Amino acid sequence: MTPTGHLDTEACYRAVRSRDRRFDGVFYTAVRTTGIYCRPSCPARTPAPGNVTFHPTAASAHAAGYRACKRCLPDATPGSPEWDVAADVAGRAMRLIADGLVDREGVDGLARRVGYTPRHLGRLLTQELGAGPLALARARRAQSARVLIETTDLPLTDVAFAAGFASVRQFNETLREIYASSPSELRGRRSNPRSAGVITMRLPVRTPFAGSRMLAFLAYHLVPGVEVAGPGWYARTLDLPHGSGTVRLELADLPGTSDLAAGGTGFVTAEFRLEDLRDTAAASERVRRLLDADCDPRAVDAHLGADPVLAHLVRATPGLRVPGQVDGDETAIRTVIGQQVSVTGARTVAGRLVAAHGRPVESDVPGLTHLFPDAAALAAADPATLPMPRARGRALVGLAAALAEGRVLLDRGPDRDDVRRALLELPGIGPWTADYVAMRALGHPDVFLPTDLAVRRLLAGLAASGDGDPDPEHWRPWRSYALMHLWNTLMPDTPAPSRDEEN
């Protein structure tokens, strides 16, 4: 197996020749005559076919001896959408590597999470992605370091450890090798330095991106104390491996390029305040999950927009995403809280749980006062004391115990079907809850909830409109996005913060 894995060389070259932005982040073009690798849409002159090879990851190009193009910055792209669709071992491993798991637990820890031996996992990743877990983790550290160098005033020594490097020497050598520049030279080219107390990143997303509808969904479901939102922005607390933090996102619609046949890359501005800088990579990756940043909206919209029942919804909101999560355990617990109650009622109950069991944090953002309670804290709670019916309280405590003990893992490492089966074995967890958790916590793109009352009403309304009978089977493999288009019709615009949240 060559480093190009399963890539179709002719198809890749056609994409490079047309500078097709839809493939940015899906593969990388390495040019033998220059020793650099680029994104497919790089504006530089197209190299001859005999002078290029194609790589599924930046790490694969690094391993082959190429450095990143300074013109198109190929590592500043969304990840491949194929990882979410296939949910195979490579995709699951990439999510954990991006979260910094290799830095925290090593290759052995990564292998345990995905259920393979370290040696076999290395073979699989090399076959599928052109690089092993250490090389993939190294590429992630280099990208994190470049962002910190160019957007903050952090001392370079702090940048090295914040990005996950074990030493300053390793940091310097890696950046020189990958970017052909020293850390000091990279810092000299920045255009918008920030203070050391704030890390501001531009998180790449494929366009179009319906940021205003993402904001509306998050604002409608926010939990007091943990989340706040206002016109054009959303903020929340983060429970990270080494400490707490907060993030504030600027969410706006990002249209596609004028060429409708080509996608593009837009950016969501994220302002992080972290207790421990070692959590930089984990924080940015978890927020990218929340934004569904690796989605290919062109492919989703083309498929769903061809359905006569959904076509008008897709045209009205191109680039609609499925909101993900920053913490899988939190998402599952909030889902149980929301069983058979209104969204407003679920927010009220969750806010009471946060006040009673969440850990207080200090924040410069008014309204952010607590971390969401961790699974261990809720597992120790008496169901009779929880502000919900006794049966649901027992279900919540049982779920929290399973999460705290590791019997259910929601970090996108295990197989989705295995997680679903484990959830259904728990008392009080039915198919609706398990599937909703799969969609939000595990990033499953093909979930549908036929028993959801709102969905049933909406489907009946669509059937009565005369455009045909809705058939969710025709919406595969993007039924989660079809579900969001249905729910989107019910979502109010983002409200201004309440007085309680401002004070």
Image (cartoon, rainbow, N blue to C red):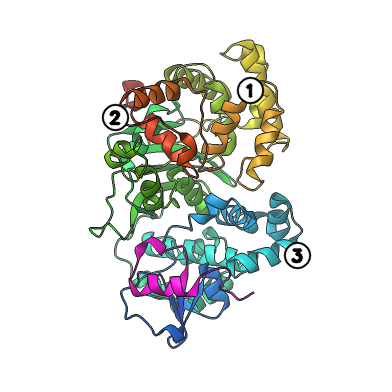
Alpha carbon of mark 1 to alpha carbon of mark 3: how far? 38 Å
The correct choice, above or below, for 57 with respect to 288 in the image is: below
At a point 38% along the width and 31% down the height, the residue shown is 486
Report x, y in % for residue 478: 47, 43
Q: In the rendered image, which quarter is residue 211 located in? A: top left
Could you tell me if residue 177 is visible in this image?
A: yes
Q: How many marks?
A: 3
Residue 268 numbered tag: none
* Local secondary structure at mark 3: helix
Residue 14 within the segment the image draws in magenta = yes
* In the rendered image, the vertical position of residue 206 relative to residue 493, given as above or below: below
Please tell me which of labels 2 and 1 falls first in the chain.
Answer: 1
The disc, 1 or 3, on the residue closer to the chain's N-terminal end is: 3
Depth order, front residue of 494/193: 494
Answer left or right for 476 relative to 375: left
Amino acid carrying mark 1 in the image:
Leu
Disc sitting over residue 396 in the figure: 1
Q: Which of 375 and 391 is in front in this view?
A: 391
- Res 366 visible: no
Say which residue label 2 marks. 493
Q: Give the range drawn in magenta.
A: 1-28
Quadrant where the image shows the N terminus:
bottom right
Q: Position of residue 325 (x, y in %)?
A: 50, 40
Q: Do the residues labelled 2 and 1 touch (CB within 8 Å)?
A: no
What residue appears at the point 33 percent right and 60 percent down from the top-left corner?
193
Q: Which of 292 and 383 is in front in this view?
A: 292
- Circle 3 sits on which residue? 119
Q: Which amino acid does label 2 sit on?
A: Asp
